[in-house]
């Protein structure tokens, strides 16, 4: 979303006039005129103000707490190399698919479409601020391999409130041992925590180079665990904990089609 488009969106949502915004900007130590604001709102002028002015305008337009820099971020995105933009778009798509996958069979098709619409319409600058916040970074440090953020948004058209932990999908299953629940090629998320009997975990056998397997486990003692597949074509195995690496407890998967 170009700077001018985001600026107009903030101003329209604030329902303030250019004169009112200019007056409020003075409270934040920035002196601008209503005519200058009108100039910024015009795509043809291709004008981008200083960071201080962008922050003041966002605050004057009652930007959400924590998003006062949203216009500043958007200004830099407008001039960023296309490779950077492509990477950010890819990450945003991963997050969107992760959330939608988490709601499968819990909400209607129409509600799912509305959720996707909300994320598709989210300004790229807002996405970056949300998922690079101190809260998000702290969560990543506490739980390596996961991004544990609670995202709360109200969807008026569907009349539901969404509260969901967002975790990036990152591991591809190598066999059909847990079919039909999890199939070969499905992408899964894992939580790094102590596993227990009954958990479905992601494992890698040390004698295999890259195979990542999903199995239900029974913890016998500190030295052995039993790996139980659902698919009868695969054997139940009791293995030494020294012969496998448990990457984590599977919390979510996305079916590959």
Image: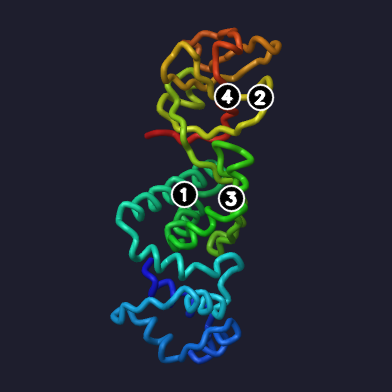
Seen at 56% across and 44% down, the residue is 147
Name the residue beneath numbered marker 2.
195
In three-dimensional space, the C-alpha distance between marks 2 and 3, rounded to whole angstroms, equals: 24 Å
Determine contact: label 3, label 4, CB under 8 Å. Answer: no
Determine contact: label 2, label 3, CB under 8 Å. Answer: no
Describe the element under mark 4 as helix, strand or loop: strand
Determine contact: label 4, label 1, CB under 8 Å. Answer: no
Residue 187, horizontal then vertical, whole percent = 45, 33
In three-dimensional space, the C-alpha distance between marks 1 and 2, rounded to whole angstroms, equals: 28 Å
> Mark 2 packing: few (<14 Cα in 10 Å), some, or many (20+)?
some
Q: Is residue 64 above or below residue 179?
A: below
In front: mark 2 or mark 3?
3
Q: Which mark is residue 136?
A: 3
Label located before the other in sequence (3 or 4): 3
Seen at 55% across and 90% down, the residue is 23
Label located before the other in sequence (4 or 1): 1
In three-dimensional space, the C-alpha distance between marks 4 and 1, rounded to whole angstroms, equals: 24 Å
Seen at 65% across and 15% down, the residue is 218
């Amino acid at each position: 979303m170009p700077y001018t488009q985001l600026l107009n969106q903030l101003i329209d949502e604030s329902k303030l006039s250019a004169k009112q915004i200019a007056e409020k900007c003075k409270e934040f130590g920035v002196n601008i005129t209503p005519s200058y604001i009108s100039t910024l709102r015009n795509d043809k002028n291709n004008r981008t103000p200083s960071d201080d002015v962008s922050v003041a305008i966002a605050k004057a337009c009652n930007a959400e707490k924590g998003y006062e820099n949203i216009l500043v971020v958007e200004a830099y995105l407008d001039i960023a190399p296309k490779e950077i933009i492509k990477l950010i778009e890819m990450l945003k798509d991963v997050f969107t698919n992760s959330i939608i996958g988490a709601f499968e069979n819990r909400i209607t098709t129409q509600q799912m479409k509305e959720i996707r619409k909300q994320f598709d319409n989210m300004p790229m600058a807002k996405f970056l601020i949300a998922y690079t916040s101190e809260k998000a970074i702290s969560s990543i440090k506490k739980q390596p391999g996961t991004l544990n953020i609670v995202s709360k948004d109200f969807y008026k058209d569907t009349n539901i409130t969404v509260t969901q932990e967002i975790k990036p999908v990152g591991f591809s299953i190598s066999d059909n041992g847990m079919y039909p629940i999890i199939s070969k090629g499905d992408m899964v998320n894992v939580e790094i925590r102590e596993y227990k009997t009954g958990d479905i975990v992601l494992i890698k056998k040390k004698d295999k180079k890259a195979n990542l397997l999903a199995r239900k486990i029974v913890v016998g003692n500190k030295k052995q665990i039993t790996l139980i597949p659902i698919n009868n074509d695969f054997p139940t195995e009791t293995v030494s904990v020294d012969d496998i690496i448990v990457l984590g407890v599977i919390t979510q998967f996305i079916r590959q089609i």
